[in-house]
Amino acid sequence: MNWLFFFTVCFSGLLTGFGTWLVTPDTNPWNLVDNFQTGLLVTGVFCGLFSGLVTSLPIIFMERRFSKAGAYWISATSIGLSITMLGAVIFAIIADFTGSLALLPAGVMRFFWWLFLSFCLAASFGVLHNSLKIMCRTLMGLTPAFIIAGSSIDRFIHNHLLLSFLFLGAMLGFGFAIAWELLKESWLDEERSRFIVFRYYIDSPEFLAGSADECDLTLPEGPQHLFAINEKDGIHVVEVLEDEHLVKINRTALRYRVLVDGDTITIGDRVLVYHSRLARSRDVMPEAVA
């Protein structure tokens, strides 16, 4: 378990709950059917804040790139807000139509609401990362969190209380962090101290490192695009895009190499350790090109 990532995401959930509580009117905010306008406001603000904070806070803590964090914040917040608000409107229409045909128990309707909301928020992360795999991973963490926290709120808290917002945000952060940690496949670790490890997840077909803000791993200086890790047939290959003497793979200056679990990528005095749960043969690809 990467405790820095875990506490960062849980803290993002708490900030989400507190921020949503500040802008929500003093009414029951969780009943979308009976209080549509307030419910729509809460849905959009809560999910938008959660998407933005979960995406941008790790960048601030690990890279201290506020311009990059701001760009990620705007992108993630707008996607999370728009998709979940659209989903809330669709759910309200379906609920109204279903209610005109048959009277469903309130508990059943609330269960499907939390389930539908978790799917919409997971879809937001899938769209943000352009990855169905990330959407499914996020959904597996958010669904139990939404159902447990939402059911508890419906049963015990029926008014505008800070506790309900903080509880829902904390549960979502907990579920999100646990799912990402347990279901991760490949990642880079940079050990800063005994208890602090910077972790960069390799989820897309190309993981880019350099000094540019659009890179997955942004370095404080150097070429805009220094090296890339590409996935080819389930195998990760690191390729140095600029001066290969700036990057050493297992203490050797190489241009190209197939990565296996435990390989190190050294950039100056920074050491990144590659880890993967995908057991594939290195013999499929050429070893290295000096």
Image (spheres, grey):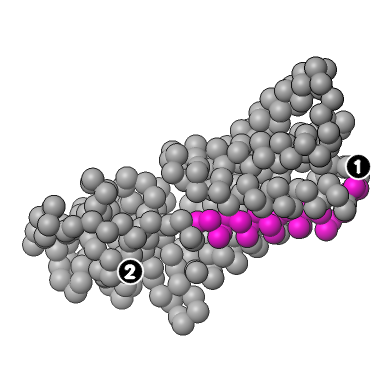
Element assignment for label 1: loop
Query: Does 197 sit left or right of 240 as displayed?
Result: right
- Pick whichever of labels 2 and 1 is earlier in the sequence: 1
Q: Which residue is drawn at 23% across and 61% down?
A: 259
Task: Residue 87: give x, y in percent of width and height.
Answer: 66, 30
Magenta-highlighted residues? 158-180
Residue topped by disc 2: 272
For the residues bearing labels 2 and 1, Cβ distance under 8 angstroms = no
Q: Nearer the viewer, residue 191 or 214?
A: 191
Q: Residue at x 43, y 64 (%)?
A: 199
Task: Residue 67: give x, y in percent of width and height.
Answer: 50, 52
Q: Which of 188 and 269 is in front in this view?
A: 188
Inspect the image, locate mark 1, and give the three-letter code of the amino acid beneath it.
Thr
Inspect the image, locate mark 2, and give the three-letter code of the amino acid beneath it.
Leu
Q: Which residue is drawn at 23% across and 46% down?
A: 232
Occupied quadrant, residue 221: bottom left
Task: Tell me if residue 119 comes above or below residue 222 in the rendering.
Answer: above
Residue topped by disc 1: 27
Taking the magenta stretch, the answer to whether it contains residue 44 is: no
Task: Tell me if residue 169 comes above or below residue 126 in the rendering.
Answer: below
Task: Residue 268: give x, y in percent of width and height.
Answer: 28, 72
Classed neighbour count for the residue bearing mark 2: other residues with Cα under 10 Å, few (<14), some (14–19), many (≥20): many
Element assignment for label 2: strand
Image quarter (top left, top right, bottom left or bottom right) of the C terminus: bottom left
Classed neighbour count for the residue bearing mark 1: other residues with Cα under 10 Å, few (<14), some (14–19), many (≥20): some
